[in-house]
Amino acid sequence: MKIAIVEDDINMRKSLEISFEDFKEFEVITFKSAVDALKKLDDTFDLIITDINMPRMDGIEFIKELNGKYEVIIMTGNATLGRAIESIHLGVKDFLLKPFEIDTLVDAIKREDKIQKAKKTIKKSKKKDNSGFLGSSEALDGVLNIANKACKTDASILLLGQSGVGKEVFASYIHKNSPRATKPFVAINMAAIPDNLIESELFGFEKGAFTDASEAKAGQFEIANGGTLFLDEIGEMPVGVQAKLLRALQEKEVRRLGSSKSIKIDVRIVSATNANLNNKINEGEFREDLYYRLNTIPLNIPPLKERKDEIIQIAEATLEQNCDKYGFDKKSFSQDAKEQLLTYSWPGNIRELISVVERATILSDGETIDAKSLHLEVRGL
């Protein structure tokens, strides 16, 4: 930890220099005035310790000049309540009265060091947590705020939104930021599996359970045990399987096809649909009791056309990824291309945007992708 000490009293300054020789974890540099310190301070310093009453520029003015760039500890021999309050308003964390033991100052430094390390960890965690989202917008942040509250629990989450808005990205985000993050994340698309195979896919089967069952197979519930099971396009699940899913969620156990033995499971369910489940309930195509079991926390993901701030961010991030992927020189969008990206309605949402950018990356000549290279006019711009 690199520390700057600003102290006009030469005896105090030398005393601190000598005392800190016993603390090898700190790199301490002293200055005789705030003016001198301002000339030498740079981004390598982690903490400033300063006196208040100094010639040319006092400690309060010095802190104002720092403009919140550094954390500060104040030390003074004749503090007043007013100056103490003023320093707190300026963000000062500790206020030490002279004379003090060196251990008292070291304790204050270590407290600040812990705070700074915690902040860096949180910042790094947040940066990591947002992986998967290529852009940010007020609309996206609103949904993420709810997701961040829900992901720390085991509550079932139902992701609602048009096809291509990023529901699986949200499901993965929820898992990665949950207590189950080190356990499996298993995704299964109900619409991609024939109706007669969904039950065996979810719950598994024993050898001989049906004609082609030459060996036993664990279902997705067993594979996801301890982690998160993402059921995409849940509205496409056959009604008969819905009843067995509801029982599995209620009893926290599954039974493989062809087996009389139940297997205990501990799985967090995140499901998604672009269908109107209320209409399906009214039409007898979706069980109302299962809907309430899955819909503890609903998350409505807005379409891309309502997240305009993300369009250029996603396009540029995708372009960079594609250039790296195909070994192309760096490319960029022209201003008219950006305008066209922003005015297009994106019925296919993020999935369509990524596809458009990938094609333009491959087919465009030169370093600049213009509006013509996007070929959006054929999509009814």
Image (cartoon, rainbow, N blue to C red):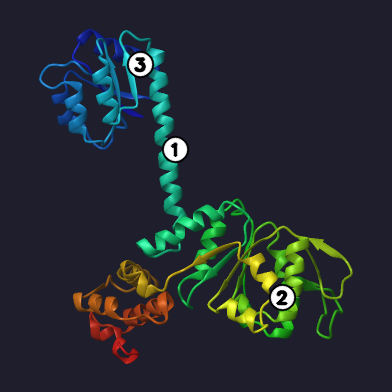
Q: Which residue is mark 3?
A: 21
The answer to whether residue 6 is above or below residue 303 is: above
Label 1, residues with CA under 10 Å away: few <14, some 14-19, many ≥20: few
Identify the element where label 3 is drawn: helix
- Looking at the image, which residue is at 32% across and 70% down? 308
Position of residue 25 in the picture relative to residue 228 (left or right): left
Residues 185 and 65: in front is 65
| Mark linked to residue 242 | 2
The mark found on residue 362 in the picture is: none
> Does residue 367 appear in the picture of this structure?
no
| Outermost front residue | 282
Residues marked 1 and 2 touching at CB (< 8 Å):
no
Q: Amino acid at mark 3?
A: Glu
Earlier-in-chain disc, 2 versus 3? 3
Q: Residues within 10 Å of mark 3 (few under 14, many from 20)?
A: few
Percent x, y of residue 85: 28, 23
Which comes before the other along the chain, label 3 or label 1?
3
Q: Which circle, 3 or 1, is nearer the viewer? A: 1
In the picture provided, is 333 more to the left or to the right than 19?
A: left
Tell me the kind of residue under disc 2: Gln
Distance of label 3 from label 1 (alpha carbons)? 26 Å
**Mark 1 lies on residue:** 118
